Amino acid sequence: MSRDREGTPGSWEVFLRPRRGLAHQHVGSVRAGDPDTALLRARDLYTRRGEPLSLWVVRSDDVYAAAPDERDPYFANAEHKPYRYPHQFAPLTVGGSDGDRDH
Amino acid sequence: MTAPQDLLDRFEALIAAGEAVEPRDWMPDGYRRMMVRQIAQHAHSEIIGMQPEGAWLTRAPSLHRKSVLLAKVQDEAGHGLYLYAAAETLGVDRADLLDALHQGRQRASATFNHPALTWADTGAIAWLTDGAAVLNQAPLSRASYGPYARAMRRVCQEEAFHVRQGYDLMRALCTGTPEQKAMAQDAVNRWWLPAVALMFGPPDTDAAGDGTRAAALGASVSKRAMAWGIKQHTNDELRQRFVDICVPQAERLGLTLPDPAIRWNAERGHYDFTPVDWDVYRRALGDDTHWARQRLAHRRAAHEDGAWVREAAAAYAARTQTASERGERS
């Protein structure tokens, strides 16, 4: 019997919204042949405790990604542009640095 | 393309800074091999570890204890799956890892090659071997490989329940009839050595080493794993911590840990115990391979008996895919 039938089915990345007010977070992966089964397996594996609100499953092959190691210039806009950060500018209050942050 | 030395420098800088190594980062082959080996061995131990306790599910003494044990054994299956998922981020396939387990090319922890003879064994296993696992896994949740560390964090959160319910089960037996208490003591006599010796791995420091090549090898593997940020403590350090935690817990239950050398050492601030040298370690492995064969045979049978489920799921997936393609065309 071929690996396709006897081996493991496709991989799905699992995203869980663990509670209200939080975005979905990547928690791991499951194997399943179809989306409904993937959801069932993700539920059994990642939501045995707590009060999870929502689950997403996405075929692992469908995740289109960029990683800094592979495309160095790709994320270059995050570095060497200090003017994107509030603390590069004159503080709003005399003493503290508290007021010059965004939050 | 970056030169290999640059890649190695960047990898070592990450480790030195205590940053996580993530799946798509470059990593030395030795690191990848060590991670795959460790995660796979860990995953195999989780699923083989379901067997000694799983055998008691239908014989639990009350509905409450049965529900608890079901939840616990289900968690172990889940831990295996978290770990197989983490291993797959290193470019291996879980089907191949399971093949390797089934064919004896990779192993599970030898701890579970001991039989659970009575109901009390389920309590002793959870209290002692899961208690030992927590001590190993808490530092592993800061291991340098990101997906492994994250899986360990999930595992640790659940492991606390395992230990507590095991201790609670033992406490119930120890406050019960004399026969029940004797059953608890008997189970502790069986599970103490596997927990203290096998769960922490072979001796890897001079204190417990016996100067043999095996001891030197154990120490060098531990050193490598520590240099790569996979381990934070030696096996022997964690073993000492385990003894220090268990002795007062056993005293509260009125049980005796089966090691006459256990006594408080005020000078060291630790309990002394019989050092786990290679002789003790080999003794803990057991010379009876019957249960090792049994565990593997059971695992293989479960896999083969489940083949029809995997085939049915594949057929269902193929059919729904065809149907949705037809739907799109029409």
Image (spheres, grey):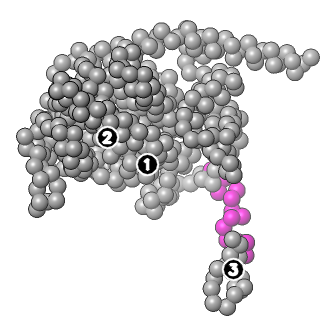
Q: Is residue A3 above or below residue B106?
A: above
Q: Is residue A82 magenta?
A: yes
Residue placed under numbered mark 3 in the picture: A100
Which one is nearer the viewer's eye here, B72 or B325?
B72
Give the residue drawn at x 71%, y 82%: A89
Q: Chain of mark 1?
A: B
Q: Which is closer to the viewer, label 3 or label 2?
A: 2
Q: Which amino acid, mark 1?
A: Ser
Residue placed under numbered mark 1 in the picture: B141
Quarter of the image where one finds residue A68: bottom right
- Our reading of the magenta stretch's main secondary structure is helix
Q: Which is closer to the viewer, label 1 or label 2?
A: 2
Residue A38 is situated, as x and y percent measured from the top left of the image, at: 64, 27
Q: Which amino acid, mark 3?
A: Asp
Q: Dot 1, crowdedness within 10 Å: few (<14), some or many (≥20)? A: many
In contact (CB < 8 Å): disc 1 and disc 3: no
Residue B152 is situated, as x and y percent measured from the top left of the image, at: 45, 43
Circle on res. B131: 2
Q: Which amino acid, mark 2?
A: Gly
Residue B54 is situated, as x and y percent measured from the top left of the image, at: 38, 21
Q: Is residue B25 magenta?
A: no
| Mark with earlier residue (1, 2) | 2
Give the residue drawn at x 60%, y 16%: A4
The residues colored magenta run: A70-84
Q: Is residue B43 above or below residue B329?
A: below
